[in-house]
Amino acid sequence: MTFISYAQNFEDIALWRALQFFPGGFYIDVGANDPNHDSVTRAYYERGWRGINVEPVDVYYQALCRERPGDTNLQLVVGETQGEVDFHVFPDSGLSTASDEMVAMYAASGIQLEKCKLPMRTLASLCEEYVSGEIHFLKIDVEGFEGAVLRGMDFSRWRPWLIVIETPFDQEPEWKDIVPAAGYRKVRFDGINTFYLANEHANLAGAFDIPPCTIDEFHLRYGHPLAFPVGAAEAALREQARRAELAEARVRELEGSRWFRLGQQLNPVRRLLRR
């Protein structure tokens, strides 16, 4: 079965190189967003893996419930404590956040967010309730709230083999010492995310020596921006379908007209006159 990559920056391929020999694995995706577009976990779900998807934004949460019925899908914020938190929604994007700093930055740029209240739980409490075995990878993409997620995890009890954390702008985040102190080493930075490997799985480090490439024998999802562009082709097909529908409607209109029916009735007379 050819591996089809759905992730934004080949994160799923990088993980697959290390994890492909462990079928039926388990993942936790904090900030899952869309179940297909830019999804790090979609390819794994297709291969029978299952896990936990945490997504606060309602439209994406509902989509996850529809398309990932085998997963545990949760609509909440993962943070440092239990309770309730203000969550700020940036519609139709992956930029929604519970981070006050990110909200201030958006406001300074003139971006208007929709605020709502959501329950907040720690990652440790979710593991306590839903995890019964190995966690093969943990992905965190929460727009500036990563530190709170990490501080709410008990890494002495639950040990994801790999952790992928979005770090696009700051290679020295305020939480930079948390993961190494928990017994993880940095094995890759892909320009968007930092990959950490648990010390007890150091034998997998070689999988990250080179970036995803042709040796991984993968295909990109249909419509991936780095694959053959389909936007223009789909627009052209929609236009042709629209024109065909209009033509069919015009034909039906003509066939229903009085003059068409009269012409049909005169056809035998025309054939007789030609003879």
Image (cartoon, helix red, strand yellow):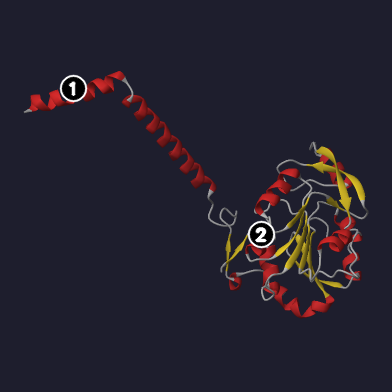
Residue under the point 53% across and 55% down: 228
Q: Does the image show residue 244?
A: yes
Looking at the rendered structure, the kind of residue marked 1 is: Leu
**Label whose residue precedes the other's in the sequence (2 or 1):** 2
Q: Is residue 150 above or below residue 207?
A: above
- Where disc 2 sits, the SS reads helix
User: Residue at horizontal 67%, vertical 76%?
Assistant: 21
Q: Tell me whether circle 2 and circle 1 mark residues in contact (CB < 8 Å).
A: no
Residue 154 falls left or right of residue 214: right
Count of marks, rendered view: 2
Where residue 101 appears, as percent x and y from the top left, is 88, 46
- Residue 103: x, y in percent? 85, 43
* Figure quadrant of the N terminus: bottom right
- Which quarter of the figure has residue 253? top left
Three-letter residue code for mark 2: Arg
Q: Is residue 20 left or right of residue 255?
A: right
Query: Of 84 and 230, which appears nearest the observer?
Result: 84
Q: Nearer the viewer, residue 96 or 258?
A: 258
Residue that label 1 marks: 266
Residue 200: x and y in percent read 83, 78
Say which mark, if any, is on residue 227: none
Q: Secondary structure at mark 1?
A: helix
Residue 86 in which image quadrant: top right
Q: Is residue 23 above or below residue 151?
A: below
Which residue does the image show at 18% across and 22% down from the upper left?
266
Q: Position of residue 215 (x, y in %)?
A: 59, 73
Of the 4 image quadrants, the one containing the C terminus is: top left
Does residue 172 appear anywhere in the picture?
no
Residue drawn at x 50%, y 45% as measured from the top left: 234
Q: Which residue is mark 2?
A: 42
Relative horizontal placement of residue 85, taking residue 208 as reference (left or right) = right
Position of 127 compared to 225: left or right?
right
